[in-house]
Image: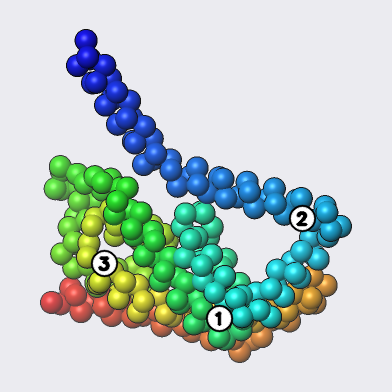
Amino acid sequence: MSENILGETKAMAAERNSFLQKHGTKLLALFFWGALVGGYYLYANANNLTLGDSLELIVDFLTASLLGPLFYMVIYALRPLLFFPATILTLLGGFLFGPIGILWTILGSNASALVAYTVGRYFGQGVLDSEEETTVIQKYTQRMRQNSFETVLIMRLLFLPYDLVNYAAGFLKIRWQPFILATAIGSIPGTISFVLLGGSFGTLAELVSGDVNVNPVTLALSVVLILVSIGLSRFIKRREAAA
């Protein structure tokens, strides 16, 4: 009798752990966004703030405070857990901080990649494993395991979904050193191009008033950097094929 109870208890614990592994980050993100929206609603009502007023307060805090860049980088690092798009935060980095936003975004995005990699490594056991060696996914996983640096570098230069690459690297348990190095190098062209793109849209007041003046120089530079990134990825592919 006691053995049956013990077995049922272990089964329930395993089921609970499995549920947390699958949905833990979603529950955390749901709690965060619920608290954020609820807190904003209460604060805005208490102070009679419009949406425009709230945006101005947030921008002033991020740009006029020494803690602003640090807060931005922390939010960027935790972004994978909150299911917030990396592209939007990267554009905001240029819009809020200008060219110096490149530095804050690079630091934040690399911390973000490491967070997602860690989540995938410890909560994604067996997700990309397959017993059929002929399947496409199995060939891909073997390539990442055997040639982690160049594979991750190519994916970064090709602007593949940022978090997908991070989680996949964690799922496959590749070494974190080549993953971070390839991420740091491969993300530079894309980060600079999107930060410059965000910085070309002017100030918040201009956006709210509808008076948007896009800087053609920064826009052209962004496009050039994207093309350079794609060209680098093709060069690496050809060199790898020749080897």
Pick whichever, 62 or 223, lies toward us.
62
Residue tagged 2:
43
Q: Are marks 3 and 2 in contact (CB under 8 Å)?
A: no
Report whether 118 appears left or right of 206.
left
Question: Callout 3: helix, strand or loop?
Answer: helix
Q: What element carries label 1?
A: helix
Q: Where is mark 3, residue-wise?
A: 176
Asked if marks 1 and 3 touch (Cβ < 8 Å), the reply is: no
Amino acid type of the residue that numbered disc 1 sits on in the rendered structure: Gly
Q: Which residue lies furthest to the top in this view?
A: 1
Residue 205 spot, x, y in % from top left: 79, 76
The C terminus, quarter of image: bottom left
Q: What residue type is labelled 3?
A: Trp
Question: In the image shown, does 38 or 217 lie closer to the viewer?
Answer: 38
Task: Report x, y in % for residue 151.
Answer: 26, 68
Q: Is mark 2 on a helix, strand or loop?
A: helix
Say what amino acid the circle numbered 2 marks: Tyr
On the question of residue 54 being in view, the answer is yes
Q: Position of residue 132 (x, y in %)?
A: 15, 43
Q: Residue at horizontal 35%, vertical 72%?
A: 183
Q: Which tag, 3 or 2, sits closer to the chain's start?
A: 2
Query: Hey, which quadrant is residue 146 in on the image?
Result: bottom left
Which callout, 3 or 2, points to the residue nearer the camera? 2
Residue pictured at 18% horizontal, 68% vertical: 147
Q: Mark 1 points at which residue?
A: 101
